[in-house]
Image (tube, rainbow, N blue to C red):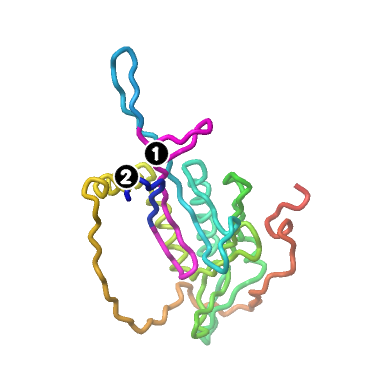
Amino acid sequence: MFNDIQKISRLLAQPVRNLLLRIHVKLVSEKEGRKENFHNIFTIEGNSFLKLDLQSFLTLELKKGEWSKDKVIIIDQRNLYQIIKGFEKCLDGIYNGGVFAVTKNNKIVIYSDMVEKHTVRIFNIGGNQRLVLKPAIIYDDSDVSYEGVILYINKTENFVELPIDAFESLYHTLTKIDMFVYSQMLLNYYVAALKNEKVELRQVTVENKKPQRRVSVFETEQKEFVKSNTPTAQSDEEFFGLKGS
């Protein structure tokens, strides 16, 4: 069974219900029309060498409706830094850019002009992929509001709402990822499972706990505000800043 596995995947983070960050390690690759294993032994002048060729990458995937390629961002060593910098820029705008305020009635408000100013568009990540991070007021199932971010993936209809703590959790996870170490750990697991030909499974029971109301991280603000969380009608090209490019 384990001999037929071509890829290993593991969930790294799920900041909200419908957004998943996974790491993948390909054990089989295709080169010049033939499939090659992740390890190859070759001999030169009577000396044998073992070469490991592990291809690892991350996926940030929106789980909403039917699966489609445009709901996935592929992250590798080439674009991970750019995505992290984009997250940092968005967080800096939220905390230091005057995007949110809290009224005397403890109601969160947002300034529409600051939203546009601190919306971050991340385009230089290869494969014609696009990410947009837009500050917004997020509402939970009980209609309680929180400061947060709307994350758009490739198209305006592919979006997910992240409260500020979920957004920061995702950012923290991305900053801690070492693809070489993570891929090697998955490979070690695969080799151990291949050797023992079994994996022990345990059933875990989790009790439901009543969610606690989160407190705003922003200070009370008494000045006039403009509350607007509804995006204006725009084409994908206009929204992602690609019109005329």
Q: Nearer the viewer, residue 144 or 51?
A: 51
The secondary structure that dominates the magenta segment is strand
Answer with mark 2 or mark 1, whichever residue precedes in sequence: 1
Q: Nearer the viewer, residue 113 or 198?
A: 198
- Residue type for callout 2: Leu
- Residue span colored magenta: 11-39
Q: Within the magenta stretch, is there residue 33?
A: yes
Q: Residue at x 29, y 21 (%)?
A: 48
Residue 13, placed above or below residue 49: below
- Residue type for callout 1: Leu
Q: Residue at x 56, y 74 (%)?
A: 137
Residue 91's spot in the image, x, y percent? Answer: 50, 60
Q: Residue at x 33, y 82 (%)?
A: 209
Residue at numbered disc 1: 54
The answer to whether 111 appears left or right of 166 in the picture is right
Q: Quadrant of residue 44?
A: top left
Q: At numbered mark 1, what does the secondary structure look like: helix, strand or loop?
A: loop
For residue 85, the mark is none
Do tag 2 and tag 1 residues touch (Cβ < 8 Å)? yes
Local crowd size for mark 2, using a 10 Å CA cut-off: few (<14), some (14–19), many (≥20): some
For residue 187, the mark is 2
